[in-house]
Amino acid sequence: MHAMNLAENLAAVQQRIRAACQRVGRDADSVLLLPVTKSQPPEVVNAAAALGLSIFGENKVQEAKAKIPLCSDRLRWHFIGHLQTNKCRDAVELFEMIQSVDSLHLAQELNKRAEQAARRMPVLVEVNVAGERSKFGYAPERLLAELPALNALPRLEIRGLMTVPPWSPDPEKVRPHFRRLRELREQCEQILGAPLPHLSMGMSGDFEVAIEEGATIVRIGTALFGPRPPARRAAAADAGAAD
């Protein structure tokens, strides 16, 4: 996309983030804008980096593996899509955070790969707040039951929760799901006896409501980069955390 459009889009999104924070008395610096670069070529990522963005989100390990080496080496990457256990080794090498840990089995495999790589892996636990069959993520009750086992994995650092709520053209209809994630985080903090600083929730259509409900990471694709080409959209429709 044209660099001028990208700069204008970024300025507009940042202004919306500031306004949402102001409405609820939050500091705008408490929200990380995470550009979702699925289907975007390296030159677009580098153009976004030139505007001051430094942390980016990818949905697919294979795409990231091909793209990241072609992007500025000062960038940092979060994984936000569904992660298969056979991709954990690559994910541990490529990403500084995995936002989509959705089972104890996956967490155990990530822990093993992080051990082999001699590193600690910051993670968010993905929660299927609405219980949608088409979405990945923990059921809230199961998360509360398995949280001690997740927290016991020595190489993983649980930093918070993530969700992809049901889509609605009306952001207000999504608000209860964001609120539920925030409340669930409070329950998790009580179980762990430690703070979980992050709530990754909100995308291009609803990030302002997510911020009002406590989001610390908003995953923005379309509002920054414009709509993806139709063929790519169709091919990528299975990736839940995309925007």
Image (cartoon, helix red, strand yellow):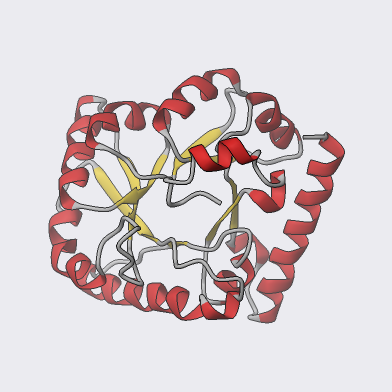
Residue at image position (51%, 66%) is 167
Count all numbered tags in the image, as a single digit. 0
Q: Quadrant of residue 185?
A: bottom left
Q: Quadrant of residue 211?
A: bottom right
Closer-to-camera residue (39/133): 133
Q: Quadrant of residue 111?
A: top left
Residue at image position (73%, 57%) is 13
Q: Is residue 85 above or below residue 154?
A: above
Residue at image position (47%, 28%) is 64
Residue extending furthest right? 4
| Residue 11, image x, y percentages | 80, 53
Q: Quadrant of the N terminus?
A: top right
Closer-to-camera residue (71/129): 129
Q: Is residue 24 above or below residue 19?
A: below
| Residue 240, image x, y percentages | 43, 51
Residue at image position (78%, 42%) is 6
| Residue 144, image x, y percentages | 20, 70
Q: Is residue 144 above or below residue 34?
A: below
Whether residue 174 sits left or right of residue 171 in the image: it is left
